Image (cartoon, rainbow, N blue to C red):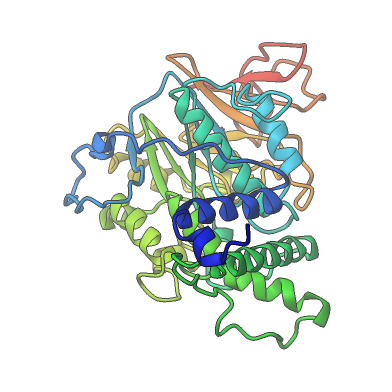
Amino acid sequence: MDYSKEVICRDVPNLLSSFVDSFVDFSVSGGLFLPPASPAPDSASQTAPSLRNHKPEPSSSSQLHTWLPSPERLIAVGDLHGDLSKSKEALRLAGLIDGSGKWIGGSTTMVQIGDVLDRGGDELKILYFLEKLKREAAKDGGMIISMNGNHEIMNVEGDFRYVTKEGLEEFRVWGDWFSIGNKMKALCVGLEIPKDPFQGIPTAFRGVKEEFHSGFRARIAALHPNGPISGRFLSQNTTVLVVGESVFVHGGLLPGHVEYGLERINEEVRDWIKGLSGKIAPDYCRRSNAVVWLRKFSNESATKCDCSLLRHVLDTIPGAKRMIMGHTIQTAGINGVCNNQAIRIDVGMSKGCTNGFPEVLEFNGNSPPRILTSNPHLKKPMNSLNSDSKEGLGQLLHEQGPKQVEVKA
């Protein structure tokens, strides 16, 4: 029987739209089918302890985590920078995924410190993979929290200085599939005509080789404020997070940031990524002293870290004992300075950085935090988290398989 497109689609517009979205996702993500999303958990966990000079922020309909109690097990993962293979290696090291990439972490909470974007060609694949794991983890009582790094902020602003040709190609492919999906939806009566994210974006760019124009254009379309990728994935990111006694932030916090309000920072960055507050990021996400750019506590030389300032910042955050940061590559691996009040977890694992050995930081119940490393050269016990001195980096707990290094609390 020859049905018109009106008859075919009249009663199934939403089903068709969902099918098209799944089709595009599968094509772009490297063959992933995203499981259904779980309902948002109770927002009670967002209530902050009493902060000095802190005023309660209005609640938001879109949940962002700023304050969470200590989970039984917590894993912190550093910068991933477009390397899906190394990302999976880090998660396997932590016992969070199996060989097929399925979540096996149970009720574990995982925090990824930001900088998924740039320097590699698997940026979208990592975003989709983390989204899949978030949904799988939620069903098991676990949680994955993604954070904004300086490279997420830069890309939403249209600053592509650190993108690779492989990254541009990945976004070009996304642009092609996304446009095909929109054309399919436009054929169906009953569906609103999709907004064209490419509208108003030039087709050529001065200073960019012609062969990269399509990828450059697709990247702008995907990542500008309220773009299909930024709005879907990056707007879920938090910028500052307190889990129990640990403060997570990509670059670092200064007293002014705490006084301004941690929830306020998270909500304003989210609203900016959603396209509600202009094209330029808030000032505290730009410049060298920004929360995603600061390096005062992450210099590999302990003598160049401002421990006095760090103690002052932690004193203004109730219950905080340590700040955990990414952003600055630690060639010696995960380490701590300032009596382990500053723990730096960016090991440059991406092949686009230093191709470092994947490492993650683990908190397990009341036990001291420890480093899980894939570095085969770490065969001798070490006693300290101090990057300037290998005297002590904790105690090597296992000689076989992934090395586990205890960190003094």
Residue 320 in picture, x, y percent from top left:
34, 34
Instruction: Return the residue found at the far front.
Output: 1
* Relative to 80, residue 267 above or below: below
Note whether residue 51 is visible. Answer: yes
The percent position of residue 92, horizontal first and vertical second, equals 68, 26
Expressed as whole percent of the image width and height from the top left, the position of residue 125 reads 68, 48
Q: Residue at x 29, y 41 (%)?
A: 317
Location of residue 405 with respect to 338 vertically, above or below: above
Where is 387 relative to 177, above or below?
Answer: above
Residue 377 left/right relative to 96: right
Identify the residue at image location x=30%, y=32%: 319
Residue under the point 59% across and 77% down? 198
Q: Residue 150 placed where, x, y %?
A: 55, 59
In which quadrant of the rendered image does the N terminus lie? bottom right
Above/below status of 198 relative to 348:
below
Q: Is residue 376 left or right of residue 102?
A: right
Give the residue displayed 19% in from the left and 50% down from the top.
Answer: 54
Horizontal relation, residue 273 to residue 202: left or right: left
Q: Nearer the viewer, residue 361 or 339?
A: 361
Question: Which quadrant of the figure has residue 38?
Answer: top left
Determine if residue 337 is in view. Answer: no
Q: How many marks?
A: 0
